[in-house]
Amino acid sequence: MKQNREDIPFEYAHCFATDGQCPQRSGCLHALITELPMKTSQYASNIITAIDPRYIASLHGKGGCTFYRSSDLKRYACGMSRMFDAVPSRIVSEVRRCVQNCFTCRSYYFASRKGKRLISPAEQAEIASVFRALCPELRPIYDSFEERYEW
């Protein structure tokens, strides 16, 4: 997936550690974004947040960085307009309520259902567990999928 500066969340931390300083650097989003070209601008887009190099230096021989974020693409679901179509009518309200509880707030559920908000892999796993518990013969149905970075 081609990476653009516009996709990076506001104030997402950059990491300038070298391969010698951090063994996880080659697979970390914080390091990946430092390699993207900067736009020439007089605005705040040229001001960045960075992980303190002294922190990276203090990690030598102590294990992994707490800021590490994998640069592997994740599969996000988009929309669930037909998710409850095959659910038996006697349990559809309970299944719908439990699926709503998989989201941190009701507005996230409704935005996700309409496809205005992507459904994370963790939320998909929670929804799948609801279906396994309440209607094991069915699987959640999503409108489509997108490959994205998990910032």
Image (cartoon, grey):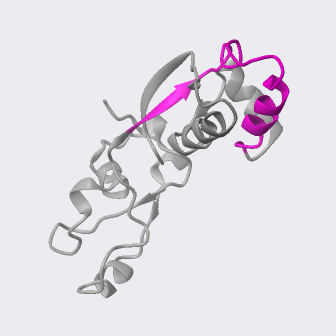
- Above or below residue 41? Residue 12 is below
In the depicted structure, whether residue 147 falls above or below residue 28: above
Residue 99 placement: quadrant: top right
Q: What residue is drawn where x is 70% and y is 43%?
A: 102
Q: Nearer the viewer, residue 128 or 143?
A: 128
Seen in the picture, residue 42 relative to 63 is either above or below; the reply is above
Location of residue 23 in the rendering, given as x and y in whole percent from the top left corner: 20, 69
On screen, residue 18 above or below 85: below
Residue 50 placement, left or right of 3: right
Relative horizontal placement of residue 47, taking residue 61 as reference (left or right): right
Task: Specify start and end residues of the magenta stretch as a single range.
Answer: 74-103
- Quarter of image, res 63: bottom left
In this view of the protein, which residue sits in the foreground, 34 or 28?
Answer: 28
Residue 59 is inside the magenta segment: no
**Who's the residue at 25% across and 62% down the image?**
25
* Tally of numbered discs: 0
User: Residue 6 in the image: x percent, y percent?
Assistant: 47, 35
Magenta stretch holds residue 100: yes
Rendered location of residue 128, percent (x, y): 58, 36
Image quarter hosting the N terminus:
top left
Compare residues 41 and 64 and report the one nearer the observer.
64
Q: Is residue 104 left or right of residue 60?
A: right
Q: Residue furthest left?
A: 20
| In-front residue for pair 101/139 | 139
Find residue 143 and report its horizontal and vertical position in percent.
57, 15
